[in-house]
């Protein structure tokens, strides 16, 4: 327990150091994350980003700049913290604790580059294909897009980790939601961001959009699982069936129809108790 708390304390210090570095750094100092992000975005958008001193990375044919605000450091910090908490059960020695920190840092960095590149690519597409969504301005659309992509990326990363760990294959949202709220709301509030005029609108979007995404995600997963069960048994599900959507629970286990053969998760399997053998007492014959 003390070892895990020590590793978590080191993780907090690393996250604080990243946040401090991002606050004090210029665009040129963030080339370690802006440069690979610009390369991935260039491949996705079919353009080339050239470094601009003091500005970031510029695409002259698209007239688009990837600057300091597009670095995705906050997402990297959120992903790093979430991975350390999700993998805390693997901390059994100082060496394993160091491995958890290193793996979490590398994976969060790689995920931040990919997710941030996807967000920037989507922003470039929306800039050339404007979508009219009920009185939303360009800044509000940009904020909504960032919340959807970043929170969705956290949930997707958490699900990948859960599957690799062999745990319950169901949409996990509690830990990603707690980490996202901490990084996107609690930390800015602690730094005095509530004094700015636009923080209230930002806070409302951050508070309301993730629960809506959770409800939509759970509904989609329930529909996919029900469709998989219907295909598996080649018939409609009866209301009185023992299988329940969305967890697909039966009396002796949980079915996860991820392939053409449904199987039972062993962590929910409970062995049946052997029935006691009743022997009839016969009186001896005279």
Image (spheres, helix red, strand yellow):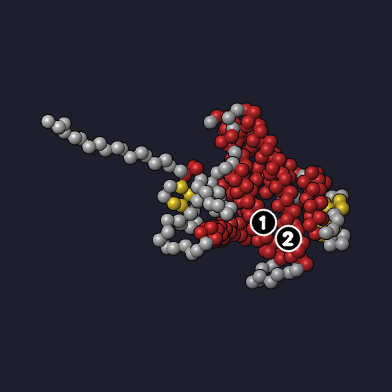
The disc placed on residue 122 is 2
Q: Residue furthest left?
A: 286
SS type, badge 2: helix
The residue located at (55%, 52%) in the rendering is 261
Q: Is residue 285 left or right of residue 211?
A: left
Question: Of marks 2 and 1, which one's residue comes earlier in the chain?
Answer: 2
SS type, badge 1: helix
Give 268 or 64, whichever is nearer the viewer: 268
Q: Residue furthest top?
A: 94
Q: Are marks 2 and 1 in contact (CB under 8 Å)?
A: yes
The residue located at (46%, 43%) in the rendering is 269
Give 286 or 127, whichever is nearer the viewer: 286
Give the labeled residue for mark 1: 149
Q: Is residue 181 above or below residue 274?
A: below
Give 107 or 163, whichever is nearer the viewer: 163
What quarter of the picture does the C terminus occupy? top left
Instruction: Tell me residue 92's x, y (percent).
Output: 58, 30
Q: Is residue 208 visible?
A: no
Give 38 or 217, whichever is nearer the viewer: 217
* Among the 4 quarters of the image, the one containing residue 16: top right
Instruction: Tell me residue 113's x, y (percent).
Output: 74, 49
Q: Is residue 132 visible?
A: yes
Disc 2 from disc 1: Cα separation = 9 Å
Instruction: Tell me residue 47's x, y (percent).
Output: 84, 58
The residue located at (49%, 42%) in the rendering is 267
Mark 1 crowdedness (10 Å alpha carbons): few <14, some 14-19, many ≥20: some
Instruction: Tell me residue 124's x, y (percent).
Output: 77, 62
The residue located at (48%, 58%) in the rendering is 245
Q: Is residue 61 above or below residue 54?
A: below
């Amino acid at each position: 327990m003390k070892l895990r708390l020590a590793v978590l304390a080191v993780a907090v210090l690393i996250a604080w150091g990243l946040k401090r570095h991002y606050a004090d750094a210029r665009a040129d100092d963030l080339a370690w994350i802006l440069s690979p992000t610009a390369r991935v975005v260039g491949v996705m958008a079919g353009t080339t980003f050239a470094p601009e001193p003091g500005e970031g990375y510029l695409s002259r044919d698209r007239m688009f700049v990837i600057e300091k605000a597009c670095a995705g450091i906050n997402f990297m910090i959120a992903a790093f913290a979430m991975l350390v908490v999700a993998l805390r059960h693997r901390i059994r020695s100082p060496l394993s604790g160091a491995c958890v920190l290193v793996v979490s840092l590398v994976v969060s960095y790689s995920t931040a580059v990919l997710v941030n590149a996807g967000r920037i690519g989507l922003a470039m597409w929306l800039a050339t294909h404007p979508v009219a969504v009920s009185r939303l301005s360009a800044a509000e659309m940009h904020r909504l897009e960032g919340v959807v992509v970043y929170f969705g990326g956290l949930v997707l990363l958490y699900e990948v980790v859960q599957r690799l760990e062999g745990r319950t294959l169901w949409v996990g949202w509690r830990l990603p939601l707690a980490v996202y709220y901490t990084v996107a709301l609690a930390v800015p509030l602690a730094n005095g961001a509530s004094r700015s005029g636009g923080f209230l609108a930002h806070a409302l979007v951050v508070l309301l959009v993730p629960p809506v995404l959770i409800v939509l995600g759970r509904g989609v997963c329930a529909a996919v699982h029900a469709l998989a069960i219907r295909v598996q048994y080649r018939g409609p599900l009866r209301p009185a069936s023992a299988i329940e959507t969305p967890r697909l629970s039966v009396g002796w286990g949980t079915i996860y129809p991820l392939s053409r053969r449904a199987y039972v998760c062993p962590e929910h399997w409970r062995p049946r108790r052997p029935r006691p053998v009743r022997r009839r007492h016969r009186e001896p014959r005279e």
